[in-house]
Amino acid sequence: MGRALVVVEDVDRDSDLLDRARAFAVGEETDLVLLALVTSDEYEDVAETLDAIGEAEHTTYDESAILDGLAGNVEDLADDALGDAVEYEVRVEVADDDQADRIIAAADAADCDHVFLPGRRRSPTGKAVFGDRTQRVILDFGGYVTVAMD
């Protein structure tokens, strides 16, 4: 029994991706690992919010509380999309650069043989200037890759 990694970015858009991953996981009798990559800006926004809450409550929140809060958002999405149909775990990482490498490393660390990720439509110029994470995962990952285009 293998595992599949699902990259979760946007709660509204990724429900279709999770539906596809659920169907795959049920059919293959496999577990899912949901990976949310957040930018340092998103992380700092949550940290600032928790700092404000902490001041009001006279407490402090550490990095694990911030990541747990972000993971809670993904778990809410997963509960709606996956329910009890498959077993899954949620991982959250802060990644600004080399997201493709982070995705591949997370899939390898979790012993996944399949990656589901959202794709973005970009012009050839956009790919040349900004790189294409999806293309790099497809080319560099040693297993299967399913891309859901928006």
Image (cartoon, grey):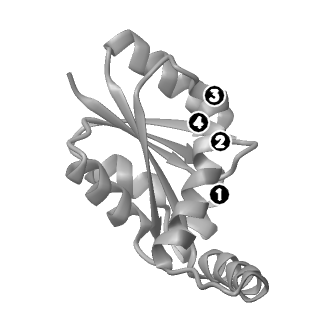
Q: Which residue is mark 4?
A: 78
Residue 82 in the image: above or below residue 125: above
Distance from label 4 to label 1 (Cα)?
Answer: 27 Å
Identify the residue under disc 1: 122
Q: Which of labels 3 and 2 is toward the front? A: 2
Q: Secondary structure at mark 1?
A: loop
Q: Is residue 14 left or right of residue 90?
A: right
Residue in the image at 33% along x and 14% along y: 28
Secondary element at tag 3: helix
Give the image location of residue 74, x and y in percent: 59, 48
Dot 1 amino acid type: Arg
Q: Which mark is residue 81?
A: 3
The reply to whether dot 4 and dot 2 touch (C-beta < 8 Å) is yes
Q: Amino acid at mark 4?
A: Ala
Q: Secondary structure at mark 2?
A: helix
Q: CA distance from mark 4 to mark 2?
A: 5 Å
Q: CA distance from mark 1 to mark 2?
A: 29 Å
**Is 25 situated above or below 98?**
above
Front residue of 115 and 139 = 115
Residue 76 shows which numbered tag? 2
Dot 3 and dot 4 residues touching (CB under 8 Å):
yes
Precedes in sequence: disc 1 or disc 3 = 3
Circle nearer the viewer, 1 or 2: 2
Q: Is residue 74 visible?
A: yes
What type is the residue that disc 2 sits on? Asp
